[in-house]
């Protein structure tokens, strides 16, 4: 099979890290016999500079025909004054919305070589490997009505949390499927004690579990307790599924269990189409880091680990995913560090390219 991929390097450090990701992609093409058909386009501020909007219609159309999309990062101070709908982030939001990428996968994996960099006790995080599945296209961030309205006593700011059975079901199934590929353990988080949408969430997830995934051990937890448990004993979890708002917060908490922003990948997946293809966008969690852009300091690992996720979730190559993750682990074990992974002044830091070299070697 040939996999068609769209590469969108974006702004700031995006192109620097994407250069390293491309080298890794090419390595897997040459050395592991995966055939890629690669297209490249613009997203974010650079797309605005060229087309007057943060992503062109042509790029969105191209995205629909691809097996996987890789984004570097978007944004920069130069674009801060643009109206909302032209801001760099809107390019990403448009892709997520157009492709209905409702399941956002954010892993938290502890690389033993980096344990010293964490603020937590080594025994709490050593060997940690969990995955948060955050609902990405509904809930509090999209519900209507929303806005700032006039009110007798002044103004009132309103957001609406709403979830349909269908929206809960599809993200739940994505999480159950993922749990099956891992340790068949899923924890669903909401606040069914105080929220109607939480009650529905809990019922729907439980019903799907009973009917379709009796082999997966399903538990439920209130999201506030979930936050506490993630810090107290994160290894009790394998896959967590939660809504858009709680997922935003909980995935940031989980991410920081393991260290630097420069290490965190993500995947956003949609629904299987009639040919069995799942639309997928892979990107590092970090932004465009204008403070270090163009200096060769950026850590490319988050971007490269995002490609590793694609090997597993889009290209059906779990062994190659493990190969790549092991290579990164070995590089870290050998003490090779970009500046963000060093406590000291960074004098001995590897550059972006040197990190890419080491991983390829
Ligand atoms: P940021 O993630 O770009 O940077 C935060 C801090 O982490 C900076 O000190 C940066 O140097 C460092 N950092 C980030 N990635 C790194 C890497 N790979 N290697 C080494 N150090 C790294 O977040 P910030 O500063 O809040 O936002 C900068 C711009 O990025 C803004 O325009 C923001 O809107 C945009 N942004 C874009 C995102 C995306 O494309 N998905 C996500 C977050 C922010
Ligand atoms: Mg967040």
Image (cartoon, grey):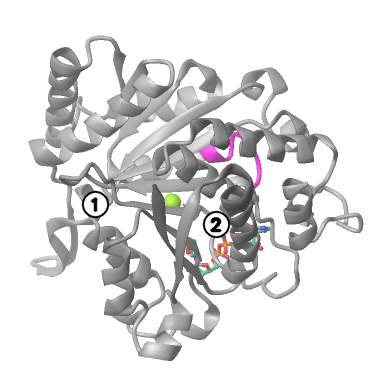
From the viewer's perspective, is 193 left or right of 354? left
Q: Position of residue 254 (x, y in %)?
A: 51, 35
Q: Earlier in the sequence, mark 1 or mark 2?
A: 1
Q: Nearer the viewer, residue 73 or 259?
A: 73
The residue located at (29%, 25%) in the rendering is 176
- Quarter of the image for residue 188 reads top left
Q: Which residues are magenta?
A: 254-260
Q: Is residue 157 magenta?
A: no
Residue shown at the point (48%, 70%) measured from the top left:
74
Residue tagged by mark 2? Answer: 286
Residue 255 painted magenta: yes
Residue 261's place in the image compared with 23, above or below, is above
State the residue at coordinates (31%, 69%): 62
Mark 1, secondary structure of its residue: loop
Q: Main secondary structure of the magenta part?
A: loop
Q: x, y (%) of residue 41?
A: 44, 75
Tell me which residue sits at (59%, 60%) in the image. Answer: 22
Q: Report x, y in % for residue 201.
A: 17, 30
- What residue would you read off at disc 1? 137
- Left or right? Give the position of 144 relative to 291: left
- Is the CB–ligand 1 distance for label 2 below 8 Å? yes
Alpha-carbon neighbours of circle 2 within 10 Å: few (<14), some, or many (≥20)?
many
Q: Residue furthest right?
A: 347
């Amino acid at each position: 099979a040939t996999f068609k991929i769209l590469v969108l390097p974006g702004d700031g450090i995006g192109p620097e890290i994407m250069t390293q990701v491309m080298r890794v992609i090419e390595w897997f093409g040459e050395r592991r016999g995966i055939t890629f058909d690669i297209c490249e386009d613009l997203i974010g501020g650079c797309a605005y500079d060229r087309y007057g909007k943060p992503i062109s219609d042509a790029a969105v159309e191209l995205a629909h025909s691809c097996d996987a999309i890789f984004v570097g990062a978007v944004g920069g101070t130069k674009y801060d004054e643009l109206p909302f709908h032209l801001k760099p982030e809107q390019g990403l939001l448009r892709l997520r919305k157009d492709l209905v990428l409702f399941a956002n996968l954010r892993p938290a994996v502890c690389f033993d070589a980096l344990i010293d960099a964490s603020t937590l006790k080594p025994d709490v995080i050593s060997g940690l490997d969990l995955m948060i599945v955050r609902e990405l296209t509904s809930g509090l961030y999209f519900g209507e009505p929303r806005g700032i309205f006039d009110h007798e006593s002044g103004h009132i700011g309103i957001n609406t949390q709403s979830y349909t059975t269908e929206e809960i079901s599809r993200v739940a199934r994505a999480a159950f499927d993922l749990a099956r590929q891992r340790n068949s353990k899923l924890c669903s988080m909401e606040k069914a004690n105080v929220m109607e949408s939480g009650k529905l969430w809990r019922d729907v997830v439980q019903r799907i579990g009973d009917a379709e995934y009796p082999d997966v051990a399903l538990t439920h937890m209130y999201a506030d307790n979930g936050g506490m448990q993630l810090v107290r004993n994160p290894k009790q979890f394998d896959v967590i599924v939660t809504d858009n708002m709680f997922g935003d917060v909980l995935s940031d908490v989980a991410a920081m269990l393991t260290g630097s922003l420069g290490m965190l990948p993500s995947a956003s997946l949609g629904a299987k189409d009639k040919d069995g293809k799942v639309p997928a966008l892979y990107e590092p969690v970090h932004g465009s880091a204008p403070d270090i852009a163009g200096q060769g300091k950026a850590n490319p690992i988050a971007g490269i680990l995002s490609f590793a996720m694609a090997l597993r979730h889009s290209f059906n190559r779990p062994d190659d995913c493990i190969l790549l993750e092991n290579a990164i682990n070995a590089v870290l074990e050998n003490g090779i560090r970009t500046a963000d992974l060093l406590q000291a002044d960074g004098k001995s830091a590897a550059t972006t390219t040197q990190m890419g070299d080491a991983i390829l070697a």
